[in-house]
Image (tube, grey):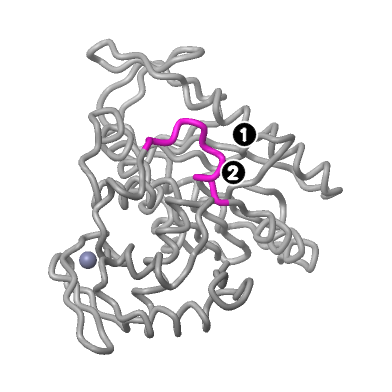
Amino acid sequence: MQIYTSSLLNLYEELNARKTLCPKDAQKLSQLRKGHIGESQWLSLLNKSSITEAKLLNGLVLIVNDQTLQMDTLLIRPDALYLYEVKNYKGVYLNGTDTITSINGNEYVNPLLQLSRTSIQLRQWLKYNRFSIPVKAFVVYINSDFTLYNANETEPVILPTQINAHLKQLSTHTLPLTDKHDRLFQMLCSAHQTEAAFQRKLPTYTFEELKKCVSCLECHSLSICLTERKYYCQTCHSVGPIAKLVIKQVEDFRLLFPRSRITTAVIYDWCNGRIPKKRIWTVLKTNFIKMGSGKGTYYE
Ligand SMILES: [Zn+2]
C-alpha cells in the first residue's frame, strides 16, 4: 500500500496556520479537507475488507501529455486496475447527464465526467508505458447521508448502500497477483508527482507575510513546545524527536517556496529562531543532498 498525502491540502493547511486566508482560499481549504475525510473513510473500508490480492495507491498524481492526472484511489487487482473517484457529498441530489443538482438547486459537475477524463488519461499512461491491463473506474459516494435520485444503474457509480456489496465482490476474486502487477506498482510509485507544483491557481503569498514558527506534523498547529531533543504539540498532544520536526519544516518550506534555496539560515528564520542553527545544519546534512560549498552551500 502506498499513500500519498495531498501536497495541495498540506500547502493550504500551512498557509492557514501562518496567515489569514481570504474567503475563497478558506473555502478551498474546507473543500480539500472534506475530500480528504471522504478518501480516508474509503481507505479505511478497503483496509477493513477481506480483499487479499491487491495493491493500493492513494493520492497518486501522474503527468500525462503535459496534464496532471490525479487519482483518489487506485487498486491493482489480478483482473484489472480499479480506479475510484471518491465524493463526500452529503444530502439529497438529483442525477443528470452533465450535472448533479442538490435539493436546494445548486448544480455541480457530474463526477462521472471527471471520472471519464481520468480513466482516459490513465489508459493513455498505460499505453505509453506499454502496459496492458483493463481499467475499471467508479465514482464512490462515501457519505452515508447521501441520496441520489434518478440514479442510472448502468452508470459506474457506487452509492453508500452499495459499498459493502462492491467490497464483497472484490473479495471473492481468487487469482493471485504476479510479477507483472508488482512491476506496475513500482512504475506508478516512481512516476508520482507533487500535485501542488502543477496547480495554476495557487493562492498568492510572500515569505515576509507568513508567520515564522515551527508547525506540528500532525495538525499544523503552531503551539509547539520544544525541549532539547523532543517536541510536544499543545493542540493535538503529539510528541516526537526534534529531527523529525525539523525535516517537516524543511518540507513545508520547500512546498511553499519551491524556487527558493534551502540553507541553514533560511530554515532558522523559517522556524523563527526556535531551533538552534547547529541542529538544523545537522538535520540538513543528514537528510538532504548538499549542493555547492562554503557560503554558497544549500540543500535539495
Ligand atoms: Zn499537533
**Relative horizontal placement of residue 84, taking residue 89 as reference (left or right):** right
The secondary structure type at the circle numbered 1 is helix
Which kind of residue does numbered mark 2 sit on? Leu
Which kind of residue does numbered mark 1 sit on? Thr
Is 200 in the magenta?
yes
Earlier along the polypeptide chain: callout 1 or callout 2? 2
Give residue 29's position: percent from left, percent from top: 31, 40
Q: State which region is magenta.
A: 194-204
Q: Is residue 169 visible?
A: no
Contact? badges 1 and 2 (CB < 8 Å): yes
Mark 1 is surrounded, within 10 Å at the Cα level, by few (under 14), some (14 to 19) or many (20 or more) other residues, namely many
> How many numbered discs sit on the rendered protein?
2
According to the image, label 1 marks what residue? 118
Q: Main secondary structure of the magenta part?
A: loop
Disc 1 to disc 2, C-alpha distance: 9 Å
**Image quarter for ligand 1:** bottom left
Return the residue found at the far front: 295
| Picture quadrant of residue 31 | top left
Residue situated in front as seen by the camera: 74 or 54: 74
Residue at position x 49%, y 35% from top?
A: 139
Residue situated in front as seen by the camera: 11 or 49: 11
Instruction: Give the foreground label among 1 and 2.
Output: 1
According to the image, label 2 marks what residue? 83
Residue situated in front as seen by the camera: 187 or 46: 187
Give residue 8's position: percent from left, percent from top: 43, 46
